[in-house]
Each structure stands twice: as C-alpha cells, then as structure tokens.
Amino acid sequence: VTAVPCHGFPEIFETIHQGKAQFGMLPVENSLAGTVIPAYDQLVDHDMRIQAEVVLKVNHCLMAPAGTTLADVRR
C-alpha cells in the first residue's frame, strides 16, 4: 500500500477518479463529535461505497508554550 496525501475530502475522491489511487480513507464517525457529515456527503456525491472499516484509537494532547501552567489554560 502506498499512501497518497490529500488535502480534504474532495481531493480524496478526485484522486480516486483520476486513477492516482484505487481506494481512499476518510473518517465517517468520531467518538467525540459523532457522524462526520461532510465525508458522507462526498460518498453520496461521488456514488462510492464503503469497502472496509478501520478503527483507530485517537489520543488527544494538550499543548502550550513552555512555562505555561495548567492554571493558565483557558477554554
């Protein structure tokens, strides 16, 4: 498998249509935000079907400039 980087959902589908890739991988569900509607919209617009599922564990990291304390962090 060779990865072909794409910038956004439309480019994934365009890359497949151009024959530069046989398959594309995109998120369709997120445990924090739910369904990824733009991904499903692209699937419908391009008449493509889901062929396989890959479940990835995602770790989120809180980053701040050096010297920042947790008390300094605001939402």
Image (cartoon, grey):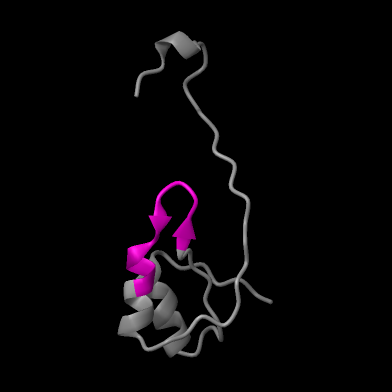
> Which image quadrant for residue 23?
bottom right
Q: Tell me: residue 24, above or below residue 32.
A: below
Q: Position of residue 9 (x, y in %)?
A: 39, 69
Q: Position of residue 51 (x, y in %)?
A: 57, 82
Q: Looking at the image, which residue is at 62% across and 61% down?
A: 55
**Figure disc tally:** 0
Let me know if residue 68 appears in the view: no
Q: Position of residue 65 (x, y in %)?
A: 47, 20
Q: Looking at the image, which residue is at 39% across and 61% down?
A: 36
Position of the N terminus by quadrant: bottom right
Q: Is residue 54 left or right of residue 34?
A: right
Let me know if residue 37 appears in the view: yes
Q: Tell me: residue 24, above or below residue 30.
A: below
Q: Looking at the image, which residue is at 50% across and 28% down?
A: 63
Position of the C terminus by quadrant: top left
> Which image quadrant for residue 13?
bottom left
Q: Position of residue 30 (x, y in %)?
A: 47, 54
Region in magenta: 29-40
